[in-house]
Image (cartoon, rainbow, N blue to C red):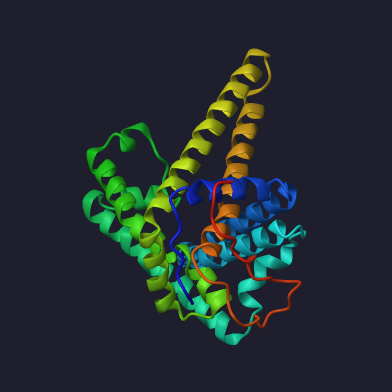
Amino acid sequence: MKLHIVPARTGMTWVKLGIRTFWKQPMALAALFFMTMAAMSLASMIPLVGPAVALMLLPSATLAMMVAAAQASQGRFPTPAVLLVAFRTGQQRLRDMLVLGALYAACFLAVMGLSALIDGGQFAKVYLGGAQLSKEVAEDPAFQSAMWLSMVLYLPLSLLFWHAPGLVHWHGVPPVKALFFSIVACVRNFSAFLVYGLGWLGVFLLGGLVVALVSALLATAGLAASAAGGIMVGAALMMAAMFFTSVVFTFRDSYEPPSTPEPEPPHDTPPPPDSPAPGPD
């Protein structure tokens, strides 16, 4: 497995590919993203261990969206079967994905635990859905400090797990090595990921502005506030689905394609398309 170093402009190419691929199969990709989020929400309702189980599912959910995006980029229709792709590719891959999920849950809960040392766990309760965010809580300096600490600590955590599901699934890399190779690839391609992040920030800001204008027009026309709220939620889900659609392209361009065919059936989980030489879109 060889690491690719790509120019900074590739980051914007990843953004464009994510948006373009999403619109090839918008209903399928949006529905798959919604189903992954729904599955994690349902898992979080399990008594006592729910939040940890939901966190363990995140690497598998990310992999499912990567596989779906790879299929859509090849002009194929991704089916709900991709949601189980992490659990259908042999015992070894299944164990590795479960270990990866457990590592992610442990690391994320450790970040929440460190933030709790600052504000007594208030930010963790709000973030994990166990408490409501009131104005008084949001303005509490301890809460804000805990929030910023969590954001700073989550950045290296996200880099560790960014490519890890794809490395485990497509390259058969053990979980701990996958974390190492993931953060190395992200750091070596920092300029491309910086442009990628700024590009998506711009997309979300522009999308939010458009939704706000549409909501204001609906309110002026006398339509119910619930209609505007539904549009905002739908737009947010759609943009999040586009973002997750783009992740597979960051993986594809960061590594050499696997040299041997994968064990799973090709109609379920094709490997990502071969990476062309990055260049302006």
Q: Does residue 237 appear anywhere in the picture?
A: yes
When the figure is inspected, residue 169 is found, relative to residue 111, above or below; the finding is below
Q: Nearer the viewer, residue 243 or 195?
A: 195
Residue 25 falls left or right of residue 103: right
Q: Nearer the viewer, residue 213 or 226?
A: 213
When the figure is inspected, residue 123 is found, relative to residue 250, above or below; the finding is above
Residue at 47% in and 47% down: 9
Image quarter of residue 189:
bottom left
Residue at 22% in and 55% down: 117
Looking at the image, the residue that sits furthest to the bottom is 91
Residue 134 falls left or right of residue 227: left
Task: Give percent across and percent down for residue 90.
Answer: 63, 84
Residue 146 falls left or right of residue 218: left
Task: Give percent across and percent down for residue 78.
Answer: 73, 60
Task: Give percent across and percent down for residue 103.
Answer: 41, 72
Residue at 65% in and 58% down: 69
Image quarter of residue 161:
bottom left
Q: Nearer the viewer, residue 209 or 142?
A: 209
